[in-house]
Amino acid sequence: MHIDQADLFEGMDRLFIRGFMALTAMERYTKGDFIFHRGDKADFFYTLIEGCVKISIGDDEMEVYTIDHLGEAFGLSSILERNYYFASASCLEPTQLLKIEGNSLNQFLQDHPKNSGTFYKRIANRLAQRLVECYKFV
């Protein structure tokens, strides 16, 4: 499966997807690596290519959500005008991600209003799904 077939980009035009991809850098992590910690400056938006990422909160790093589907996004604080990540992200297995600087992504989205509305709706839907998933831990 290619990234342009992932849920996050479904229905968006290829020019938008190519522009998005041009902003990305591929990063690889090993099991146990932290991508970011709660309280770190929220500079980057991530999209999962392969692997599994635990999103956790609190001093005991309680898991609240698992990122494990191709195209699943996290690091949303970087595009939602939050200065710092509100959770930590660590790898549960070897992981490959696309990393995008949040300010660059926000500018790109402003330059592509036709697709940005769909993009933000998908992000809002993912946040809603995560909220439902979090209730399973309560």
Image (tube, rainbow, N blue to C red):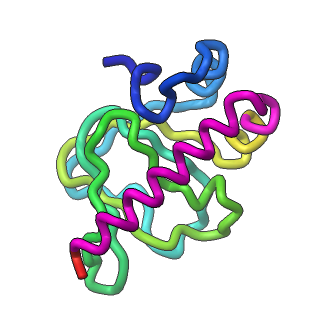
Q: Position of residue 36 (x, y in %)?
A: 44, 61
Q: Position of residue 132 (x, y in %)?
A: 34, 66
For the stretch drawn in magenta, what is the main secondary structure? helix
Reply above or below: 73 against 118.
below
Left or right: where 113 falls relative to 5: right
Is 118 contained in the magenta span? yes
Name of the residue lying farthest toward the bottom: 59
| Rendered residue at 51%/40% (across/down) | 99
Name of the residue lying farthest toward the top: 14
Name of the residue lying farthest toward the right: 111
Reply above or below: 120 against 65.
above
Give the magenta part as a residue range: 109-136
Quarter that holds the C terminus: bottom left
Reply above or below: 91 against 107.
below
Q: Position of residue 62 (x, y in %)?
A: 26, 77
| Rendered residue at 28%/34% (across/down) | 50
Left or right: where 120 falls relative to 72: right
Q: Position of residue 112 (x, y in %)?
A: 76, 29
In-front residue for pair 17/46: 17
